[in-house]
């Protein structure tokens, strides 16, 4: 034991010397690395969470095979000074010149500060907050619309439910989440208007114990298809499987966790997004400051159907998907009432997935049991 | 416990002919040597763990050195990450002198930050320095009251302070979420509910010539001040008596209740101030970024520092360094982030176990006359 430590200590000293030397001669992050494009990915949670972070990590992994590109990653980075330091560390110690901080809360003030400090490094943030008039030119946003995926989830769920009661485990009542709950419910009610969705908000993005409790509560109340919007759907999907329920996935493919009950799922397909950025960067072309798209652009996809899904459900969902892929499809369209009976979208108005109105959604549609 | 042993040794050793100096030197050397031995043992154990994973401990420690201390950038990174830990460690270390294990820094920090942000927004039109002072006061008062509540429950209701402070953390975080997502929400912060931003001018800047914000300096000063308070004043002496033997303190006529209340208020004030600094130096507003585990890491730091406010400084920097190099280790060695947690855990256990070493090595014992 003592020997290990001695070896460790010696090497530490050696390492210290070597680093000092490297820093002194300017090798760190200097021309020695210029041959490779170093791309940094930062995740707020573990990259094997079967959820939000895994979806991004899968996108990053898909870029590893691109020649001349080196991918570096860091997981569990908090939305504090930590992420600023992680970005700086990637730039200073690894020579990264393109960074993808993937969590929503990384943007303001953390990424903006770093973008100002390192004008030669390109920053692209997963979200939709970059604004040309306010923010640095070397920063930007990319974003995918996944609401259609939850709509298709809802159609499949609508066909498979026997109790006509669906369950939704949600993190926080923010616009993105509300849009998913509403899309899921509208999908199911397109199959049978008597279907309702019970929503439970856990209050946090990652709170496994509460997510399990919520799932069990939904099961006890007779909900037979469950979906969710939390950072890591693992616990929800596993709990639902144990209780013999069907699940629709979210973020990534969770079919492995529920081989019997997994129906389908709305997944991000970030590989296409990241490859687009990296290819442009390698070709020396300017990167777009704002990249957005949905199923049509290939940034969102559906998990393959699970074994339980009926033919009628597949047929219906496939037909709607074909419609969506033609472009211009609107799920949120009038006349639409919220669950208190108030009209929220007047007849004749339809919001396609890119509509700015959807980004400030503050209602649950008719058919959702729950309150914001 | 070993603190009490050490104190006893000091009491019996003080009147010896050899004088105070030697006793102090030997005891001082002991308090440095024992943790170092523990750190060495932890490093060895962790190396074993790495080898089981098929990774090189040599690479690991070289990367820790590179990522934490070896360059100006790395050093600043380390210091920056140490800053909040100084405060949250004090929140645990001060009540510990009275024998209380308070782990409520996480909640006190969240509420302190929230109160500071609210105060900053309310006084936005005042001069920057005034805004900062009001914010700091708000953080200190709210954080202090929060942990004082723990002390009050303990003294007048006999509720275990560890449990109550833990539960109060959940309540504090729920309260913060309620305000951030409800009454104090900035309507523009749709997908990450936050309060309004405090005025730009009221932000705490960096220490000139560095990237590190002033929170680090405030934290170190606070550690020194509280060290003086706890070890060089009658108040500090009284708290140590309460910690050493509650019954004896009561028989002496010490006002145990107020002592507990004051110590807890000081502890909470430190955590509340940490929240204020997080808002004023980093985030610019209060939101979920206040709840990232600084409070709980502070508990580790306090225990490793054996609840000595002065020792909190190097231990917090050590932890800052471990966390700062964590990213580099993930990137270069392909190890998951949890590796760093394993290292922290092993260090924690090793240092706690090393408590039994105090008084065992003759070299550190005063040579009292037979």
Image (cartoon, coloured by chain):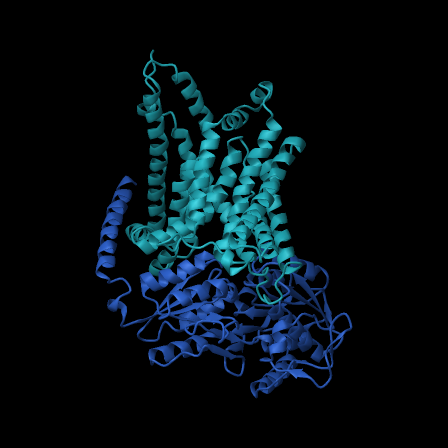
Chain colours: A blue, B cyan
- Is residue A55 placed above or below B280 in the rendered structure? below
- Residue B351 quadrant: top left
Residue closer to the observer: B40 or A223: B40
- Residue at image position (36%, 37%) is B38
Residue closer to the observer: B89 or B112: B112
The spot of residue B153 in percent (x, y) is 65, 35
- Is residue B316 placed above or below A200 in the rendered structure? above
Q: Quadrant of the C terminus of chain B?
A: top left
- Residue at image position (51%, 56%) is B202
**Count of numbered badges drawn on the protein:** 0
- Is residue B11 placed above or below A340 in the rendered structure? above
B78 left or right of B125?
left
- Is residue B15 placed above or below B291 in the rendered structure? above
Q: Residue furthest top?
A: B370
- Residue at image position (44%, 60%) is A83
- Residue A33 quadrant: bottom left
B41 left or right of B179?
left
The spot of residue A195 in percent (x, y) is 73, 73
The spot of residue B164 in percent (x, y) is 62, 40
- Residue B152 quadrant: top right
Q: Residue furthest right?
A: A341
Q: Residue furthest bottom?
A: A326
A365 left or right of B141?
right
From where the camera sits, is residue A104 visible?
yes
From where the camera sits, is residue B54 visible?
no
B172 left or right of B314?
right
Residue closer to the observer: B235 or A291: B235
């Amino acid at each position: 034991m003592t020997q290990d430590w001695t070896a460790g200590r010696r090497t530490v000293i050696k390492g210290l010397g070597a680093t000092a030397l490297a820093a002194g001669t300017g090798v760190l992050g200097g021309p020695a690395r210029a041959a490779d494009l170093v791309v940094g990915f930062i995740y707020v949670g573990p990259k094997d969470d079967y959820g939000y972070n895994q979806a991004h990590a899968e996108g990053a992994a898909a870029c590893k095979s691109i020649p001349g590109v080196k991918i570096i990653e860091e997981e569990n980075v908090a939305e504090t000074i930590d992420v600023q330091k992680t970005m700086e560390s990637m730039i200073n110690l690894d020579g990264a010149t393109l960074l993808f901080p993937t969590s929503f809360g990384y943007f303001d003030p953390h990424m903006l500060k770093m973008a100002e400090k390192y004008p030669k490094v390109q920053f692209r943030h997963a979200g939709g907050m970059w604004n040309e008039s306010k923010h640095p030119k070397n920063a930007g946003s990319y974003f995918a619309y996944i609401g259609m995926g939850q709509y298709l989830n809802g159609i499949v769920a609508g066909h498979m439910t026997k109790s006509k009661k669906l369950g939704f485990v949600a993190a926080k009542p923010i616009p993105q989440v509300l849009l998913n709950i509403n899309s899921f419910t509208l999908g199911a009610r397109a199959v049978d208007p008597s279907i309702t969705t019970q929503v439970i908000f856990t209050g946090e993005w990652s709170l496994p114990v509460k997510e399990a409790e919520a799932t069990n509560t939904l099961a006890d109340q007779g909900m037979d298809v469950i979906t969710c919007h939390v950072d890591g759907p693992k616990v929800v999907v596993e709990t639902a499987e144990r209780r013999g329920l069907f699940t629709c996935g979210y973020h990534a493919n969770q079919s492995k966790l529920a081989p019997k009950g997994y129906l389908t799922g709305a997944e991000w397909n970030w590989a296409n997004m990241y490859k687009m950025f990296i290819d442009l960067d390698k070709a020396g072309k300017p990167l777009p400051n704002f990249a957005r798209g949905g199923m049509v652009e290939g940034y969102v996809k559906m998990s393959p159907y699970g074994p339980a899904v009926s033919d009628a459900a597949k047929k219906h969902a496939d037909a709607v998907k074909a419609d969506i892929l033609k472009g211009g499809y609107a799920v949120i369209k009038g006349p639409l009432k919220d669950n208190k009976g108030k009209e929220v979208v007047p007849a004749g108005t339809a919001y396609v997935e890119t509509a700015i109105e959807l980004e400030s959604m503050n209602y649950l549609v008719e058919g959702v049991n729950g309150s914001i | 416990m070993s603190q009490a042993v050490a104190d006893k040794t000091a009491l019996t050793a003080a009147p010896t002919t050899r004088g105070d100096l030697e006793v102090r030197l030997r005891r001082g050397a002991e308090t440095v040597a024992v943790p170092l031995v523990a750190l060495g043992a932890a490093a060895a154990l962790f190396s074993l763990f790495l080898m089981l994973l098929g990774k090189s401990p040599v690479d690991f420690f070289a990367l820790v050195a590179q990522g934490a201390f070896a360059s100006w950038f790395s050093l600043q990174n380390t210091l920056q990450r140490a800053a909040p830990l100084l405060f949250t460690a004090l929140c645990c270390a001060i009540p510990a002198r009275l024998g209380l294990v308070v782990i409520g820094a996480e909640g006190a920090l969240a509420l302190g930050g929230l109160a500071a942000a609210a105060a900053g927004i309310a006084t936005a039109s005042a001069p920057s320095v005034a805004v900062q002072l009001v914010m700091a006061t708000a953080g200190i008062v709210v954080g202090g009251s929060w942990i004082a509540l723990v002390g009050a429950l303990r003294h007048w209701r006999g509720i275990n302070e560890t449990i109550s402070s833990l539960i109060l953390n959940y309540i504090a975080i729920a309260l913060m979420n309620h305000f951030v997502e409800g009454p104090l929400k900035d309507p523009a912060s749709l997908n990450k509910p936050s309060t309004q931003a405090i005025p730009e001018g009221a932000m705490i800047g960096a220490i000139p010539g560095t990237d590190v914000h002033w929170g680090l300096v405030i934290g170190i000063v606070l550690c020194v001040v509280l060290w003086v308070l706890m070890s060089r004043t009658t108040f500090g002496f009284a708290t140590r008596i309460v910690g050493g033997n509650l019954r004896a303190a009561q028989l002496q006529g010490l006002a145990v209740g107020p002592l507990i209340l004051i110590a807890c208020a000081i502890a909470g004030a430190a955590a509340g101030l940490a929240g204020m600094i997080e808002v004023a130096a980093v985030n610019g507003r209060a939101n979920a970024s206040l709840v990232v585990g600084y409070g709980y890491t502070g508990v580790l730091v306090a225990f490793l520092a054996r609840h000595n406010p002065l020792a909190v400084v190097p231990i917090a920097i050590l932890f800052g360094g471990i966390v700062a190099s964590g990213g580099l280790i993930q990137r270069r060695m392909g190890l998951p982030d949890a590796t760093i947690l394993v290292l922290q855990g092993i260090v924690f256990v090793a240092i706690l176990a090393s408590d039994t070493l105090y008084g065992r090595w003759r070299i550190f014992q005063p040579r009292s006359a037979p």
